[in-house]
Amino acid sequence: VQLQASGGGLVQAGGSLRLSCAASGTIFSINVMGWYRQGPGKQRELVATMANTGIPRYENSVKGRFTISRDYVKNTVYLQMNSLKPEDTAIYYCNFHQWGDDYWGQGTQVTVSS
């Protein structure tokens, strides 16, 4: 499975960005797509995921600000990020999980200035 992510950038605090990640290759019906991030000097952490069932999962600090969605025809996952804060600054990685295997995108930088 290959992942192509896009949509990062520089934004002021309170602003919005939308990330996209398209998956291609051998994709089965049961899978999970989502986003993780790694801030400066921090470990990679889950941001949001969504299973093929449509059930979302969010890290507590982004609840109410970020929304994950999927286009199952295009095998694409989106992350709408609103009310961005400087602490959201990180490299955001797209993740695809199926049958015990994890695949990662190349990472896209999100920088939120105060």
Image (tube, rainbow, N blue to C red):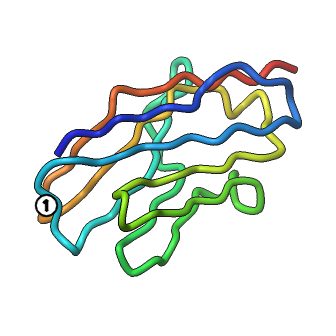
Q: Give residue 18's quadrant in the image.
A: top right
- Depth order, front residue of 10/22: 22
- Depth order, front residue of 4/104: 4
As helix, strand or loop, the secondary structure at mark 1 comes to: loop
Q: Position of residue 97 (x, y in %)?
A: 25, 57
Mark 1, other Cα within 10 Å: few <14 / some 14–19 / many ≥20:
few
Q: Position of residue 51 (x, y in %)?
A: 38, 71
| Depicted 72 relative to depicted 110: above or below | below
Quadrant in which the C terminus appears? top right
Q: Give residue 88's quadrant in the image.
A: top right
Q: Position of residue 7 (x, y in %)?
A: 57, 32
Residue at x-position 52% and y-position 56%: 48
| Depicted 1 relative to depicted 17: above or below | below
Q: Is residue 3 left or right of residue 100?
A: right
Q: What residue is pinned by disc 1?
A: 100
Q: Give residue 44's quadrant in the image.
A: top left
Residue at x-position 66% and y-position 26%: 89
